[in-house]
């Protein structure tokens, strides 16, 4: 496998999806489409944003070992399927993940040399709340839940290699582009070991 992995985490509503959409137009990258049990939002499409399944289907996938990682976030399951990620890595692609802090830890542990991690956030809590309200996709209770979760996630931003404050979209995008150039330079352990033995 010679591709690389870019993990983006950060509070729901911080702008990760918009940044990823723009990156995908310019890079030979594969976005890891997660599977979730949460309800589909208006504007989202099954197979584009997520694969939307029931809790029973998700639990069956866990039992069958189909996930590279999975977690329970905001009372719903979210998981990354193994097969498409391995295929994209074999095709030498940059694999982009939009996953939470729990998923980040698992993938970093499994692929330490291939992973580049970025935590993205808004300048402050008020701005996040404003964006969640403007998005108009979640109930009041859901927004409160997401804000609470965001405060907890922020405490773990120091576990990431890079930190982006998404105040100005173009600036955040240009920072992310630079990080991607570094991410693509990472080499898998097997490559380094094989190279060293043949050197
Ligand atoms: P949302 O419901 O706003 O789309 O996502 C909620 C949270 O779940 C976000 O923090 C997002 O990064 C995270 N998430 C999405 N997919 C996955 C996944 O496959 N695994 C993990 N661990 N987290 C995920």
Image (cartoon, rainbow, N blue to C red):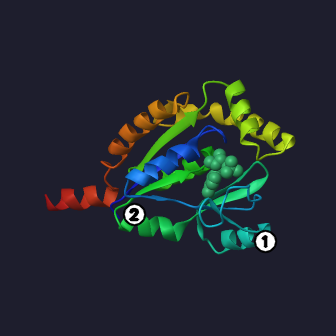
Residue behind mark 2: 89
Q: Quadrant of residue 158?
A: top right
Q: Quadrant of residue 76?
A: bottom right
Q: How far across and down, in percent of the image, does residue 61 sit?
A: 67, 72
Q: Residue furthest left?
A: 199
Q: From what the image shows, is residue 114 above or below residue 156?
A: below
Q: Is mark 1 within 8 Å of ligand 1?
A: no
Q: Quadrant of residue 148?
A: top right
Q: Is residue 62 visible?
A: yes
Q: Residue at x 49, y 69 (%)?
A: 84
Q: How far across and down, in percent of the image, does residue 23 sit?
A: 44, 48
Residue toward you, 181 or 113 = 181
Residue toward you, 175 or 169 = 169
Q: Which mark is residue 56?
A: 1
Q: Quadrant of the N terminus?
A: bottom left
Q: Sequence order check: which comes first, mark 2 or mark 1?
A: 1
Q: Quadrant of the C terminus?
A: bottom left
* Secondary structure of residue under mark 2: helix
């Amino acid at each position: 496998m010679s591709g690389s992995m870019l993990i983006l985490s950060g509070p729901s509503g911080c702008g990760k999806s918009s940044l990823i959409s723009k990156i995908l137009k310019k890079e030979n990258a594969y976005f890891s489409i997660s599977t979730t049990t949460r309800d589909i939002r208006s504007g989202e499409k099954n197979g584009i944003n997520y694969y939307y399944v029931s809790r029973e289907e998700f639990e069956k996938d866990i039992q069958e070992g189909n996930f590279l990682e999975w977690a329970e976030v905001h009372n719903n399951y979210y998981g990354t399927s193994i097969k498409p990620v391995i295929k994209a890595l074999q095709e030498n692609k940059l694999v982009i993940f939009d996953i939470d802090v729990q998923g980040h830890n698992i993938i970093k542990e499994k692929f330490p040399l291939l992973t580049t991690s970025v935590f993205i956030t808004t300048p402050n809590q008020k701005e996040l709340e404003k964006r969640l309200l403007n998005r108009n996709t979640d109930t009041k209770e859901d927004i409160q839940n997401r804000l609470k979760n965001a405060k907890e996630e922020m405490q773990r931003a120091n576990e990431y290699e890079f930190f982006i404050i998404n105040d100005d979209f173009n600036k955040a995008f240009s920072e992310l582009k630079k990080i991607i150039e570094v991410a693509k330079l990472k080499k898998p352990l097997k490559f380094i070991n094989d190279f060293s033995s043949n050197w």
